Amino acid sequence: MASLEDRISKPQKGQTAGDAEAFNGTNSAQPTSAAGETGSWPDETSAVDTNSGPSTVEAKAEEEMSSLSRAQTDGASSEQRGTSGIYEPSYEVDVQLSDLQKDSGNPLHSIKSFEELGLDEKILQGIYQMRFTKPSKIQEKALPLLLINPPQNMIGQSQSGTGKTAAFVLNILARLDFSDSMVNKPQAMVLAPSRELARQIMGVCQVMGQALDRLKVEASIPVEKAERGKQITGQIVVGTPGTTMDLIRRRQLDATNIKILVLDEADNMLDQQGLGDQCIRVKHLLPRNVQVVLFSATFPDNVVEYATKFAPSSNTITLRHEELTVDGIKQLYLDCPTETDKYDSLIRLYGLMTIGSSIIFVRTRKTALEIERRMNEEGHTVACLTGEFDGSQRDVIIDSFRCGHSKVLIATNVLARGIDVQTVSLVINYDLPDDGRGHADPQTYLHRIGRTGRFGRVGVSISLITGPQSYQMIKEIADYFAVEMTSLPHDDWDKVETIIKKVIKSSRASADYNKAGKSAEINMG
DNA sequence: AAAAAAC
C-alpha cells in the first residue's frame, strides 16, 4: 500500500489527457526503442513476398492484410484528434433521455469545455492535473446529465480508454459535502469486479481530488486480519461487492449518507452469477434516492433489461457494437494444429518480438500456473496473477507490472476488465474467452484486447486457436464486432514476422500523431 | 471456468 500512496502523490508529466482511466503517475514511459523508431522493420515492399507462389494461408493473409490496410486508411480520414489529446475515432453515441429528464424541459446540451460545467475551482485543478484540456465524447455527453439536479440515474457506454472513470469521479467530487458534520461520512460508493480495478479507481479519485484537502478515499476490499475492524470514514469508498456488503452489515461502513452508487464494468457486475446478487443487496442497504450510475464498454442485450431495473429512469448513452472496437488494436489469430503447439507458438512469438509489456490471458488458474512455471524454467521472466493468490500478493504482482518491473503477466479473466497499464502493447489470448457453453464470449474478448492500444497507442492482440471449435469462436467474435482478423500461419515464422511487422507499421501511422507516441514498442528481437 | 466473501 505504501507504494500505492507513493505513486499517487507523485503524478508524472507527459500523460495524455486520456489517462483518465490510468493509475496516474505509475507508468513512466519506457525507453523508446531506437530500432523500432528508425525502421528496423524490413522495407514493406521487399518484406511482403507476393511472387513466390503463396500458399493458401499466405494468400489469405495477404488478402486480409490489404483489407486491413484499406480499413486503416478509411479510418484515418474520419478520425480526429481533439485538443484533449484523446485519440478518438469518429463514432456516434446514442443519447436516450429518461422521461424524467424529458419532462423537466432541460434542453440536451453537450459541453465543449470542462469550464462550462460550473465546477469548483479545485475540481478543475484536478482535471488539469489529469492533463485534460477538452472533454472526450463520453464526458461531453455524460457530464451534463450526471450533474443535473436533482440527480438522475445514468447508464453509460463508451469504448475502453475514453475517460469513463474520470466522468463518474468528477460527478462524485462535485457532489461531496465537506462540511464539519459530513466530512467523516461515506457519501459515494464505487463498486468494481476485481480488487485490482478497485485500487486503480481509488488512484484516479486521489489524483483528481488532490486539491480537495479534506478528501479521503477509502478501499473496501479484503485486508489482512490484523487490519480489520476499522471504521470507514472516507467520503468516497471504492471496493468489491462482497467486502463492501460485509462492512455495511458490521456497521463499519455507515451507508446512510451514500448519495451516489457507481458500478464500473456494470454489465459484468450485474450479469455474473453471485456478483449480481451482491450488487443488489448492497443497493438495498443504501438510501432509496441514491443516484445510480452504471458504466461499461459493453452492455450485451441480455443485461440491458436488468441494468434498466437496477438504474430505473436512467439517461442512457449507448453505442452500436460495430462501433466498439478500437481501430488502433490490430487483431490477429494463429491457428495451431494441436493444443501443445499453442505453447510452442507462444514461445516463438516471444522470440520474435520484444515488447513493452504484455498480458497472456488463459482460461483457468491451473493453466496460468503451468505456463508461468514452464516459461520461467525456460528462462523467460514472467509473473502470474489469478484470484487464488491472497490480496497482498496480488497487490505486489500488479504494482510490479504497473511500474514495468515485470513485463509479462499471465492472467485469468480477473484482469480482463478495466486495468489500465499504458505500456501494454501486446495481449495474447492463449485461450479464447468462452461462455461456458462452447461459444465465444465477445464482451470479454473486447475487454481483454482493450488492455492494449490505449489512447491511440500501438496495440496488437494475438489469439491462439486450435481445432474447429476455437476457429468457430474467433469467427463469432469477428462477426459480432464486424472486424477483420488477420490470420498468422503456424508453420512459417518468417511469414508471421512479416505480417506482424506490417500490421504494426500500419498502426504506426496513428501512433505518429499521438502526442504521447511512446509506445511503438513492438520490435523484432 | 473465473470472479467476488472478513459469512
Image (cartoon, helix red, strand yellow):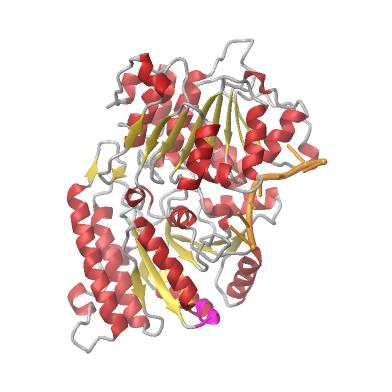
Measured as percent of width and height from the top left, residue A375 is found at 58, 73
Q: Foreground: A386 or A35? A: A386
From the viewer's perspective, tell me whether residue A329 is left or right of residue A77: right
Report the residue that reaches farthest toward the top: A180
| A244 in magenta | no
| Residue furthest out toward the bottom | A53
The number of numbered badges drawn on the structure is 0
User: What is the quadrant of residue A353 in the picture?
Assistant: bottom left
What is the x, y in percent for residue A303?
51, 44
- Where residue A118 sits, quadrant-wise, is top left
Question: Quarter of the image containing the N terminus of chain A?
Answer: top right
The secondary structure making up most of the magenta span is: helix
* Vertical placement of residue A385 versus A136, above or below: below
Q: Position of residue A215 (x, y in %)?
A: 56, 23
- Can residue A267 be seen at all in this image of the molecule? yes
**Going 51% across and 37% down the picture, which residue do you hit?**
A307
Does residue A265 appear anywhere in the picture?
A: no
* Vertical comparison of A137 with A383: above or below: above
Q: Is residue A72 left or right of residue A518?
A: left
Query: Is A314 drawn above or below residue A512 in the view shown?
Result: above
Q: Residue A88 vs residue A5: left or right?
A: left
On the rendered image, what quadrant is the C terminus of chain A found in? bottom left
Residue A429 higher or lower than A288, as above or below: below
- For the magenta stretch, what is the residue range? A338-342
Residue at left offset 78%, top offset 29%: A250
Camera-side residue of A321 and A149: A321
Q: Point out residue A394 in the picture as x, y percentages from the top left corner.
A: 64, 52
